[in-house]
Image: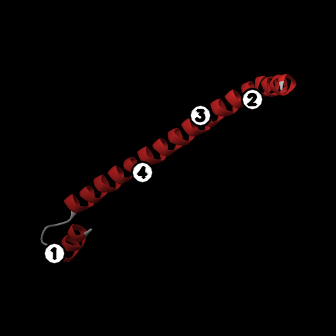
Amino acid sequence: MRVDRAVVREVLDRLQPLAIEAALAAMEAQNVYHCDKRQQIENAIQHAQYEVARARRQYDVVDPDNRLVASELERR
């Protein structure tokens, strides 16, 4: 029994630093994933804001008497 306990204790002592390193690596990978995801969302927001501004500029340029073009831009 004492030998078994000693062996188990030694094995756990040897594996513990590896488990800590693995946990830290997993946390870092998760952090990188969240940063990438946040950047993708920010890029999507910027793209949407650009498209809105572009549509607004197109609409503002259209002659109000040209109802075909104006109605198409309003629909968009």
Nearer to us: label 4 or label 1: 4
Q: Earlier in the sequence, mark 2 or mark 1?
A: 2
Q: How many marks?
A: 4
Kind of residue at badge 3: Met
- Spatial CA distance of label 2 from label 1 is 70 Å
- Which residue is label 4 attached to? 44
Q: Earlier in the sequence, mark 1 or mark 3?
A: 3
Residue at x 19% of width, y 73% of height: 71
Q: Residues within 10 Å of mark 4 (few under 14, many from 20)?
A: few
- Spatial CA distance of label 3 from label 2 is 14 Å
- Spatial CA distance of label 1 from label 3 is 57 Å
Front position in the image: 32 or 57: 32
Nearer to us: label 3 or label 2: 2
Residue at x 38% of width, y 47% of height: 46
Nearer to us: label 4 or label 2: 2
- Which residue is label 2 attached to? 18
Q: Residue 34: where, in percent of width, then height?
A: 51, 40
- Which residue is label 1 attached to? 67
